[in-house]
Amino acid sequence: FFALVAAKYGLHDDSSRQWAMCQIHYALGDTGRSFVVGFGQNPPTKPHHRGNSCPQYPLPCSWDAQDNPGPNPHTLYGALVGGPGKSDDYTDDRKDYVRNEVACDY
C-alpha cells in the first residue's frame, strides 16, 4: 500500500509501483498458491481462526475443531493468512498460527 502511495507522489514511481504490484500478485497466487482465503489459485482452506474452524451452529465449538483434518466449515473470504516462511514454504495447517493466522497487519 505504501509503495503505491509513494509512487503516486513521485517517489521512485515506476520501481515502487512495480514492486507493489509484484507483492499483490504474489499474495493473490501468481506463483501457484494464493494467501488470500477464498480467492485465487489454491487458496488457504484452514486458516487459524476460531470462528472459522468451529462447526455450524448449533453444534458446540471446542478445541477438537482444531483437529478436524478437512477444510474449515466457514470461509473467511478475503482474509490474508500469515504466508510462507523464509524459504517460500507454506503448509495449509490451522495449527500453524504463524503462517495461517488471519490478521490485518501482515
Image (cartoon, helix red, strand yellow):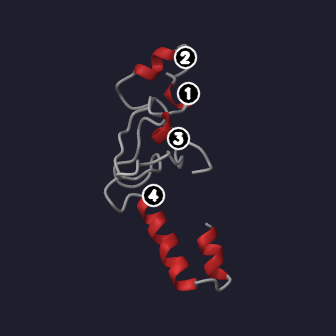
Side of 57 where 99 appears, left or right: left
Q: CA distance from mark 2 to mark 1?
A: 9 Å
Question: Taking 91 as reference, is 95 above or below it?
Answer: above
Q: CA distance from mark 1 to mark 3?
A: 11 Å
Question: Taking 5 as reference, is 79 above or below it?
Answer: above
Q: Residue at x 68, y 83 (%)?
A: 9
Q: Quadrant of the N terminus?
A: bottom right
Residue bearing mark 4: 27
Please, what secondary structure does the residue beneath circle 4 have?
helix
Residue bearing mark 2: 61
Instruction: Give the crowd class for mark 4: few <14, some 14-19, many >=20 residues within 10 Å.
Output: many
Residue bearing mark 1: 50
Amino acid type, mark 4: Ala
Residue 89, position as x, y percentages in the image: 34, 47
Label 2–label 1 contact, CB within 8 A: yes
Amino acid type, mark 3: Leu
